[in-house]
Structure formats: C-alpha cells, structure tokens
Image (cartoon, grey):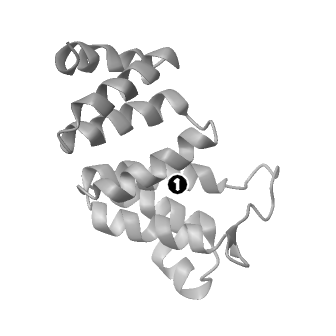
Amino acid sequence: MLERVVNSDTNNTHAYFNLGLANLFLEDYKKSIAFFSKALRTKESGGFLLDKKYGQENEIPFIEIVYWRGIASYYNDSIEQSISDFNTCINLNFKTGDSYLYQGYNFVKRNDLKNACICFGEALRHGNNDAAPFKQKYCR
C-alpha cells in the first residue's frame, strides 16, 4: 500500500519514513536505509535539509529520520554512515543518550574501545542506563 503511495507521490515523507521503519523491523536494513534516505531527500531544498512544515503536528523532523537511518545503518554494518548519522543527532541534542549508546556500539564494531568507552560514559551521563553493562564490559 505505501509503495503505491510513493509511486504516485515521490515527495511523501511519511510514506518513505514508514517504509523505512517497516523494513527496519523486517530486518531488511539495506531497503530501510534506502527509504530513510528517500524520506530525507523530500526535505532537501537548495542543498539544505529543511523541515518544510516545522511545528506542524504531522511533520516528521529530519533529525528523526536521520536517527532511524543511523540505527538501520548500524544493523547493516554501514558503520561510517551510522557514525555520521549519530554525530548529527548528538550535535543537535536529539535522543542524545540513545545516540551515544549506538555510537559506542559502532566503535566496538570498529574495535575502537577508547572511543566506545567515551560514548558509553556520555550515554550514561545523558540518562541511558543501558550503557552501564557495556561500559563495564569494555572499559577497564
């Protein structure tokens, strides 16, 4: 159904976003990333990402899309894309604790335990207690 919507309206952010989420939960991470990227392209204007209807109740903020693409990228082992997306989230103070946690996971996958430990510490500092066992496991 949603795929028919995007075939008829290529600027439908909601349809692309929901297809991204659906494919993420179906564990088709490559497809999920593609749909999140298409959702972000609906927000491009003059080389910038804009929330065209900022503040409207049904608007999906671009940073929300970036966050979910970061998660899909993490599970797809697209570590550089995931790091970039979570850096954007952290810089814009969006779901900071969760973003630092995923960033820590990314650094563990890279075998960069020094940065992983920094991120797990920041995740804890921002209220994400899920980081505690990872900090204990990787940071001595």
Query: Amino acid type of disc 1?
Result: Val
At horizontal 20% and vertical 12% (from top left) the residue drawn is 140
Identify the image quadrant of residue 48.
bottom right
16 vs 84: above or below:
below
Q: Nearer the viewer, residue 87 or 16?
A: 87
Q: Position of residue 101 (x, y in %)?
A: 38, 30
- The mark total stands at 1
**In the image, residue 62 lies at what x, y percent?**
63, 57
Whole-percent x, y for residue 69 in the image: 44, 56
Which residue was labeled with disc 1?
A: 66
Residue shown at the point (17%, 17%) measured from the top left:
137
Residue 42 in percent (x, y) is at: 63, 74
The answer to which of 58 and 107 lies nearer the viewer is: 107
Any part of residue 120 in sight: yes
Taking the image as shown, residue 86 lies to the left or right of residue 57, namely: left
Q: In the current view of this chain or complex, which residue is farthest to the bottom?
A: 8
Relative to 86, is 58 above or below? below
Please give left or right for residue 126 compared with residue 116 in the image. Answer: right
Using the image, determine if residue 48 lies above or below residue 87.
below
Name the element at disc 1.
Answer: helix
Which residue of the protein is positioned furthest toward the front in this rendering? 114
In depth, the one of 58 and 86 nearer the eye is 86
Using the rendered image of the protein, determine whether residue 1 is visible from the camera's viewpoint: no
* Residue ID at (39%, 49%): 83
> Which residue is located at x 38 percent, y 59 percent?
81
Q: Residues within 10 Å of mark 1 (few under 14, many from 20)?
A: many
